[in-house]
Image: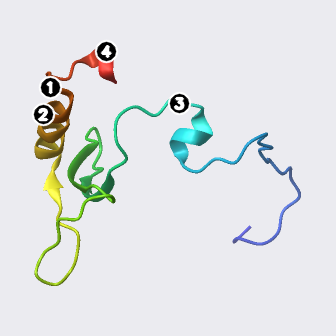
């Protein structure tokens, strides 16, 4: 009644391949670069990534930490690399 053991079932997932992330677990195809999320907002009805960092980046601050950039800056850099604007077809 108050958090004790109860009789019941157990649910598990058997995967044929390792899932390295939620994306891998869902079987989604990865598009674009891998960014490490530094800051996000997951409040109700809002799921916004605010700042990210590229793990392959050599840009460091004075303390030797990777620099974070806003999501808009990251997308802008990606567009510059691709030489064109991103569209929903890229997602």
Image vertical order of residue 82 relative to residue 64, above or below? above
Estimate the x, y position of residue 57 in percent, counting from the top left.
25, 59
Marks 3/1: CA–CA distance: 26 Å
- Farthest residue to the bottom: give it: 63
Estimate the x, y position of residue 37 in percent, counting from the top left.
31, 56
Marks 4/2: CA–CA distance: 17 Å
Residue 80's mark?
Answer: 2
Residue 83's mark?
Answer: 1
Residue under the image location 70 percent in, 70 percent down: 3
Estimate the x, y position of residue 90 in percent, counting from the top left.
31, 21
- Kindly indicate whether the residue at mark 1 contacts the one at mark 4 (C-beta within 8 angstroms): no
Residue under the image location 89 percent in, 58 percent down: 7
Marks 3/4: CA–CA distance: 15 Å
Q: Quadrant of the N terminus?
A: bottom right
Marks 3/2: CA–CA distance: 25 Å
- Kindly indicate whether the residue at mark 1 contacts the one at mark 2 (C-beta within 8 angstroms): yes
């Amino acid at each position: 009644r108050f958090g004790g053991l109860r009789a019941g079932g157990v649910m598990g997932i058997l995967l044929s391949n390792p899932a390295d992330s939620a994306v891998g677990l869902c079987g989604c195809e990865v598009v674009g670069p891998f960014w490490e999320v530094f800051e996000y907002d997951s409040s109700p009805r809002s799921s916004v990534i605010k700042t990210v960092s590229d793990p392959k980046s050599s840009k460091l601050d004075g303390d030797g930490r990777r620099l974070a950039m806003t999501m808009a800056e990251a997308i802008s850099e990606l567009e510059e690399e691709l030489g064109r604007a991103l569209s929903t077809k890229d997602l």
